[in-house]
Each structure stands twice: as structure tokens, then as C-alpha cells.
Image (cartoon, rainbow, N blue to C red):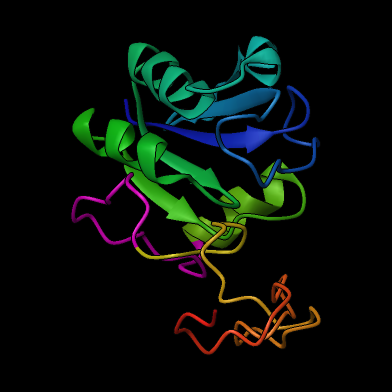
Amino acid sequence: MAKIAVSSQGDTLESQVDPRFGRAAYFVVRDDGGNVSAVDNTAARQMSSGAGIQAAEALAKAGVKKVLSGMVGPKAMNALQAAGIEVIEGAQGRVADALAAYEQGRMAQVATEAVSAAPAGAGMGMGRGQGRAMGPGGGRGRGGGGGGRGGGRGGCRR
């Protein structure tokens, strides 16, 4: 039987979808026969990193073949795809509503090509900005700077 999991804030079909895959408290799992169970993921909320990868491994171990979530990060996406789990993003509302939307074709599978987990280009907060030239020199090296005492013309006078 194929199993589909939904990232959730609770452990029932009436629970709200958790938009975060890796840090979701639970995954509500339903099989083709309509049987519902839950995978507890509450420990992932305390992890500093790797929560998405751990969640992907837990779902693969549970035999899940499809995942519905609000958003899946790049490392978790790679782990899910490596496990052969189909990813569908954009889930929202109650878990039951997300499952119904998927079954009615209102949610599309995410592209399956490999996703890069490495940063690509400068993003916000990368510390590589050009500055705003707000200082006294206007960003042009005109900040006054010592200057010294004397004519500064070189040559020696006796």
C-alpha cells in the first residue's frame, strides 16, 4: 500500500498543516486503505541542524511514498528524493483538506532534479554589501585623516 504523509502540527486529520517540513511536530500518514497513523517528529524542534534530513529518514523507514508540506528545504528535498519519496509543496489548512486538494489535482509535484544545498550567490545578510557612504568621507576616502603639520612640499630648507 502506498502511504502519503502530511507535515502537521498535531497527530490527526483535523490538525493544521505545518508549513515547515523538517520542524513539523508530526507527520500524519494515510495509506490507500484509509488507515491513519502519525510519525512523532517533536524531537526535531530542538535540533540546531539536520531536522529535515532526520524527518526524511523517519518517513522512509515508515514506508511513505509521498509527502505533502508547505515547504521543504534543499537538504531535506535531496534526502527525500534519494529515498524515492515524491514531494508536493504548497499544503495548507487542515491535514484532511490538504489530502483532498492533492487527490483533486490541485497540488503539483515539485520538480525532481537534484537541488543544490550550497548557497548560490549573495543573499540577505551575507555581509557583502557596498555600504551607503554615510560617513564623513562619503565613501570616497575623504575623511580628513591627520594631514600632518608643515607645507608638505618636499625638499629640504636650511
Q: Is residue 107 left or right of residue 19?
A: left
Q: Residue at x 20, y 50 (%)?
A: 114
Left or right of 42? Residue 5 is: left
Q: Quadrant of residue 76?
A: top left
Q: Residue at x 47, y 45 (%)?
A: 73
Image: magenta residue range: 104-120
Residue 40 in the image: above or below residue 137: above
Q: Which quadrant: the C terminus?
A: bottom right
Quarter of the view holding residue 122: bottom left
User: Is 72 situated left or right of 74 in this image?
Assistant: right
Of residue 154 and residue 71, the one placed in the foreground of this image is 154
Q: Is residue 111 magenta?
A: yes
Estimate the x, y position of residue 83 in percent, counting from the top left: 23, 27
Is 82 or 38 nearer to us in this picture? Answer: 82
Eyeballing the image, is 128 above or below 96?
A: below
Q: Residue at x 67, y 47 (%)?
A: 19
